[in-house]
Amino acid sequence: MHPAPLRCLDRAVELHCFAMERWRRKPIELFHRRSLRSSATREGLDACPSLEAGEEEGIAVRVRDEHGRGSGFAAATGGDEGAVAWAVERACRLLPGRAPAAEGESWARRDGKVLADLDAGEVDSPESLDRWLAMAIRELGPVAEGRVDAAVTIECLVSNTGVKAVRIRRRVAAHLAWPAPGANILEAPRTFLASDLAGLSRSLAAERSLSEPARAGPRGRETVPLLLLPEAASVLIRGLVQVLHLDRSSIGLPVGPAWKIVEDPRAPDSPFGGIFDDAGFDARAIELADGRTVTAILDGPGLFRRPSFRDPPSPMALNLRVRAEPEPAPERFTVVSGLRIHPVGDAWLLELTALPPAGSSSGSERARRFVRVEPARLVLNVSAVTGEPRPTPNGVITPGLILEGLRPVPA
């Protein structure tokens, strides 16, 4: 076993005992996160690299009212008794009053045995990150700027309801920017994510296979299919999940044939997830859509997440996976490398960054496009996927996503 997580768990148990001695009458849950980070940055092969390493630590506590009226939550930077004392005092002040709180069952009960998820290894050194980055810039030219970030995160959860859990996660992310064709500017950086540097290389290869085929942009307002690269696809997927898979009234709504979505926190190839959720329940997979209808929503034990240690656990997606079978790309399509969602009333205005057609030498052919559509209508346009799936920073494992039948609106 990796020794550092077990030492962190011992420390978390000590801090929990400290909190319980001072606030004996209230159930307390303590969440401790410690991250070891390193990074390397380069502006081209000949530039001197910038290497960094550091550490972050934080505490979060939930205090439950002994009369069952709900919980108070607070978080603090650091990992000592002072941080715990401040957080518990703050959480106690935020406890609900006499009115009942509709909290649901969000406190796990376990047998007090250690639950460990310790597969990850050590954090990569800044020097090893720089060697990988130099290789990427050399092989993927003309990359103009690049940064690689690595982190090993140790998370511990202790409560007086019998939870004593520890896990370690390892993630590596590359942020690469290419020059825009025919222009003295850089494209927006594209981000690639994996559990290690070998996985990062595979993610790059999967992206290149989607970006390199011949393609043609739309003529006028012609509805040429859109091929969203995985990072852009992940923004759309997570946005649609937030709209369609948190409200029980959505179950049964029709979806497009490629909207086959699974929340899969136990997936071994994901940089996210693990065997237990962020409240201490056993993690569970759930099918959200089957290519015909919405089949489930994100709710209940096994699906509690903390976006950061400063957030209380709540049901949300952690590791979404697109399970549609990849198909060949259409003959003509527009490659979309970036996507932003702008809510406009009940509709979305999608801001798309389209790559120029193959062989283009003019930056003017690279354009922003806009599509206005309601989310429930948009999910019907998810027609197919293509290429190899890869993890993304949004917690989505997806191939390229093909949208058909969307008509751009004037910019």
Image (cartoon, helix red, strand yellow):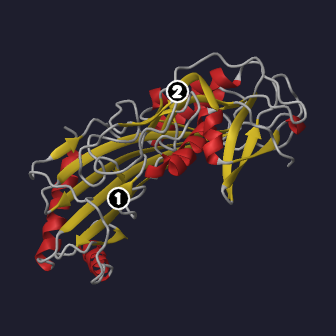
Q: Which residue is mark 1?
A: 313
Q: Position of residue 171 (x, y in %)?
A: 43, 40
Left or right: 28, with 174 as reference point: left
Placement of 129 over or under 76, stated as above or below:
above
Asked if residue 51 shows in the view, the reply is no
Instruction: Using a 10 Å C-alpha cutoff, classify the residue at mark 2 as few (fewer than 14 neighbours), some (14 to 19) or many (20 or more).
Output: many
Res. 223 image quadrant? top right
Asked if residue 5 shows in the view, the reply is yes
Q: Position of residue 228 (x, y in %)?
A: 66, 33
Q: Position of residue 50 (x, y in %)?
A: 57, 47
**Residue at x-position 36% and y-position 39%:** 265
Placement of 255 over or under 374, stated as above or below:
above
The front one of 361 and 125 is 361
Left or right: 300, with 50 as reference point: left
Secondary-structure class at tag 2: strand
Left or right: 300, with 200 as reference point: left
Placement of 69 over or under 358, stated as above or below:
below
Badge 1 or badge 2: first in the primary sequence: 1
Task: Give the Cα separation between the discs numbered 1 and 2.
Answer: 28 Å
Q: Identify residue type, mark 1.
A: Pro
The front one of 21 and 411 is 411
Q: Identify residue type, mark 2.
A: Pro
**Residue at x-position 33% and y-position 55%:** 34
Q: Are dots 1 and 2 in contact, CB under 8 Å?
A: no
> In which quadrant will I find the N terminus?
top left
Q: Which residue is mark 2?
A: 389
The front one of 288 and 266 is 288
Left or right: 94, with 221 as reference point: left
